[in-house]
Every structure is written in structure tokens, then in C-alpha cells.
């Protein structure tokens, strides 16, 4: 019998939105605050790379580990502790006496942010539908936009850059308190209509071996897909200005406005396509979006035309908007619900790696060859992403089979979105949780589900 997940609680939904805003705030602070920080500490401009590297290392480590520890610590406790850690790191920024301390705080901030990002994405993949999943990621962009305003307001008022970080640290502390007060509310519940579960969802728990998750090809192809997607998103935003000025002859002011239009189309796309995905289903929207990214990249690759390059950027931004949230939402369809939390952690970590390595590699190519390589490189990345997605979509999820709902299209009337959505995350119907590995290692009878939130 197909069941639908309970609607998300308004309080938890609000906290999730605020948490994604908080993830973007520190990124926005650094860009405006760094000139003042550099002057205060007497360090060269390129020293910002130390902060970025430390933050990336912390983010990668915690996002991956969070996926493997969610079942033990619970998502509520993870969010409370990680947000508190981020608040302490930002407080360290505000009182830091020198660059060395700042680098250590950047590492702590990365650890806190990565765990929040991974934990919330894993929870939302099972508890929220396509609309809210897209809007959550749109709110991250809102946080990135608010961060510079906070730092600008502090500096304009004659205050030190430390005040900007102090303000955000206070907001993070309040958010950590809210997560701490709602720890029990974040526990995932099985659908109330599931036979034999009543209203508590107290089904027999199954621990799926870590190696069983790591052996799944879909886990690694999914992680690679996330790395490719973020590489496209970041590379287009990072190198578009150079392409439009040096490669297409636009003025700096016009090119800057076009880059803003690219990021704006990403934000608007997530707001609009969240509703569209809820109506049409994630799989159709994902296919159209991936095709749109390739088409936009092809427009950017057309030599000589500034208008086509700008149009291509906007097309890429709007088409790319729902890809990250919808790929996260449908993780269980590809790997099985019992492996979803771990897979999402690996995917978030891989996305950070893709954002760090590929844009930098493109920068080397641009310096060695020409800025004109950006368009063709984006086309290649977009086509590779389409191929990876199609291969993953055709492969049945772990544990999918007769009577199981973990894989996309596993039965009549069961889709990855909408009222009948049953395979959108680790909190799906209990029958989803039995994977091939868990069947071999834990031969239990009756409906089972993975251990979630320590239950």
C-alpha cells in the first residue's frame, strides 16, 4: 500500500529556511570585509586563499561524515551542534588577533557549515517535496545576498569589520538554540497509515553496513554528478565576466550586470521551478533542466556574439536552478532509502570538491589558451552530467524489487513527487529500507527501515 509522508511542520520548515540563509551569510561577509581584514592584519590580498582552503577542507570532511553519523546522533542534535560550532567560529572571526587564528576559525566554520548542509539536505530529501526543496536552496542564495549588506552597513556606520561577523554569530547562536529546543521534533516518522506502525512509526530498525553503501556504483556516480553540476554552476559565474569583457568586447559595467543576471536567474529559477517540479515530477524537470544547461552552454560557446553569450548564461542559470535540490530529493530513487543519508553526505562533499577543483582547472586552461575555452568546456561538462544522470535513472535502486517502493517508477501510481511520492528520501515507506546488502546481513521478516535519528 502506497503512503505519503506527513506534511512538514511549519516550525521545522521555517527553521530549515533560516538555516539555509545562515549557510550563505558568511560567504557574503568575506567578499566585502576582506579588504578591511587584510589591512588590519597586514597580509597580502592572496592570503584569502588560506581561509578558503581551510573552510573547504572543513566543509568536505564534515559533509561526508555527517551522512555516516546521522543515524547515530539524529538530525536535530547534528543541526544544533553544528550551528553552535558555526556561531563559535564566527565569534572567533570577530575577536581574532591575527590571520593564523582566522584560518583556524575558517576550518571550524567549514566543519559546522558542511554538517548543517549535509544534515538538512538529507532530512529535506525525505520530509519535503520538490517545491520546498528548491526554495530551501533559493534561500541559500538569499543569505549570500544579505551577507554583503550586513558587512556594508557595519562599515558604513564607521564600525569595524568584526561587527559584521559578530552580528551573524549572534544570529547563528539563536538558530542553534532553536534547533536545540526542537531536537525531538526533527525525528523522522514513518507514515501513520503504514500497517502495523500506528502513529509512532516504531518499526524494526536495520543498520546497513557502511561498506554496503560504499560498494554501490550509484553512490559514486551520484557523487560525480553533483561535482559536475556544481563545477558548471561555479565556473560559469566565476569566468563569465572575463569571457564577456575579453572575449566578447563588453564593458566592465555591462558585463558585471550580465553576471548578476546569471545569479539572479538561478535564484528565480529555484523559486519558479519548485512549483513546476511539484506539479510535473522531479524526473521530467531534471531531464528538461539538464538539456537546458547543455543548450545554454552551447550558446555561450558560439564565438563572437555577446548577445548569445549573455542569453546562454541566463539559460544556464535558469535551467540549472532545480538540478541540485532535485538530485538531492531523488537520491533514494537511485541508491535505495537505506543508503540515502550516507549518499547525500558524499554528494554534498563531492559538490564542494567540484567547486574547488574544476573552476581552478578551467582558469589554468584559460591562462594557457584563451577565455574562449569556457563555452566548449561547459558543453562537455553538461553532456557528461546528462550521461551520468541517465545511467543512474536506468539503474534500479538498491533493494528495489517487487513490492518495494524505493526505486523510481516502482509501481503504479508511485512517483518521485506529489502526493504519492514514496521514494524521495531516507524517510520513505519502511518497505523501502531493505537493500540487497541488508537482506544478506540482517535476514529479518516483515517491513524494516534504516536506523534514523538514533531510533
Image (cartoon, rainbow, N blue to C red):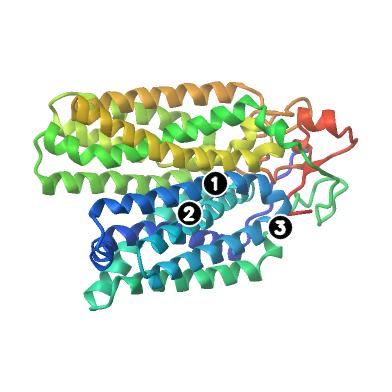
At x 67%, y 49%, the residue is 69
Vertical comparison of 123 with 291: above or below:
below
Marks 2 & 1, CB-CB < 8 Å contact:
yes
Marks 1 & 3, CB-CB < 8 Å contact:
no
How far apart, in angstroms, are the residues tagged by discs 2 and 1?
9 Å
Question: Hey, which residue is sitting farthest bottom in the picture?
Answer: 158
Which of the marked residues, 2 or 1, is nearer the chain's N terminus?
1
How far apart, in angstroms, are the residues tagged by discs 2 and 3?
25 Å
Specify whether residue 188 is in view.
no
Question: Mark 1: which secondary structure?
Answer: helix
Residues 102 and 419: in front is 102
Which of the marked residues, 2 or 3, is nearer the chain's N terminus?
2
Q: Which residue is mark 1?
A: 61
Q: Which residue is mark 3?
A: 187
Q: With 243 as the anchor, is 133 left or right in this view?
A: right
Q: Which residue is mark 2?
A: 110
At x 55%, y 27%, the residue is 221
Q: Residues within 10 Å of mark 3 (few under 14, many from 20)?
A: some
Image coords of residue 95 (percent x, y) = 40, 73
Q: With 119 as the anchor, is 256 left or right in this view?
A: left
Q: With 219 as the anchor, is 131 left or right in this view?
A: left
Image coords of residue 315 (percent x, y) = 30, 35
Screen quadrant of the N terminus? top right
Circle nearer the viewer, 1 or 3: 1
Amino acid at each position: 500500500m502506497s503512503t505519503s509522508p506527513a506534511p512538514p511542520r511549519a516550525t521545522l520548515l521555517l527553521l530549515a529556511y533560516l538555516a539555509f540563509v545562515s549557510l550563505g551569510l558568511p560567504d557574503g561577509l568575506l567578499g566585502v570585509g576582506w579588504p578591511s581584514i587584510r589591512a588590519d592584519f597586514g597580509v597580502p590580498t592572496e592570503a584569502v586563499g588560506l581561509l578558503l582552503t581551510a573552510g573547504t577542507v572543513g566543509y568536505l570532511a564534515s559533509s561526508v561524515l555527517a551522512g555516516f553519523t546521522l543515524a547515530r546522533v539524529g538530525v536535530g542534535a547534528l543541526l544544533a551542534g553544528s550551528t553552535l560550532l558555526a556561531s563559535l567560529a564566527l565569534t572567533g572571526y570577530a575577536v581574532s588577533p591575527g590571520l593564523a587564528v582566522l584560518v583556524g576559525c575558517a576550518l571550524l566554520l567549514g566543519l559546522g557549515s558542511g554538517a548543517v548542509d549535509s544534515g538538512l539536505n538529507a532530512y529535506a530529501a525525505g520530509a519535503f517535496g520538490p517545491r520546498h526543496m528548491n526554495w530551501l536552496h533559493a534561500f541559500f542564495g538569499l543569505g549570500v545576498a544579505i551577507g554583503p549588506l550586513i558587512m556594508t552597513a557595519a562599515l558604513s556606520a564607521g564600525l569595524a569589520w568584526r561587527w559584521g561577523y559578530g552580528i551573524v554569530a549572534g544570529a547563528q547562536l539563536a538558530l542553534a538554540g532553536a534547533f536545540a529546543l526542537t531536537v525531538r521534533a526533527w525525528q523522522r516518522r514513518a507514515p501513520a497509515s503504514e500497517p502495523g506502525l500506528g502513529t509512532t512509526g516504531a518499526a524494526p530498525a536495520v543498520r546497513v553496513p557502511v561498506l554496503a553503501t560504499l560498494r554501490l556504483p550509484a553512490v559514486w556516480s551520484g557523487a560525480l554528478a553533483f561535482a559536475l553540476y556544481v563545477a558548471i554552476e561555479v565556473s560559469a559565474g566565476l569566468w563569465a565576466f572575463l569571457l564577456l569583457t575579453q572575449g566578447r568586447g563588453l564593458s566592465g559595467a555591462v558585463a558585471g550586470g550580465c553576471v548578476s543576471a546569471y545569479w539572479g536567474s538561478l535564484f528565480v529559477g529555484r523559486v519558479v521551478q519548485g512549483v513546476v517540479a511539484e506539479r510535473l515530477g522531479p524526473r521530467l524537470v531534471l531531464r528538461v533542466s539538464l538539456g537546458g544547461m547543455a543548450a545554454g552552454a552551447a550558446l555561450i560557446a558560439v564565438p563572437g556574439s555577446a548577445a548569445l553569450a549573455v542569453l546562454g548564461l541566463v539559460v544556464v542559470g535558469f535551467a540549472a536552478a532545480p538540478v541540485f535540490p532535485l538530485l538531492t530529493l531523488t537520491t533514494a530513487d537511485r541508491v535505495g532509502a537505506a543508503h540515502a543519508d550516507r549518499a547525500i553526505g558524499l554528494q554534498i562533499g563531492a559538490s564542494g570538491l567540484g567547486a574547488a577543483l574544476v573552476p581552478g582547472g578551467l582558469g589554468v586552461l584559460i591562462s594557457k589558451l584563451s577565455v574562449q575555452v569556457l563555452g566548449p568546456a561547459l558543453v562537455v561538462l553538461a553532456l557528461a552530467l546528462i550521461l551520468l544522470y541517465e545511467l543512474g535513472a536506468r539503474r534500479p535502486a538498491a533493494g528495489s524489487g517487487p513490492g518495494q517502493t524505493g526505486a523510481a517508477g516502482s509501481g503504479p501510481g508511485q512517483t518521485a513527487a506529489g502526493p504519492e511520492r514514496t521514494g524521495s528520501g531516507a524517510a520513505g515507506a519502511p518497505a523501502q529500507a531493505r537493500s540487497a546488502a541488508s537482506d544478506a546481513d540482517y535476514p529479518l521478516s516483515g517491513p524494516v527501515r534504516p536506523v534514523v535519528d538514533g531510533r
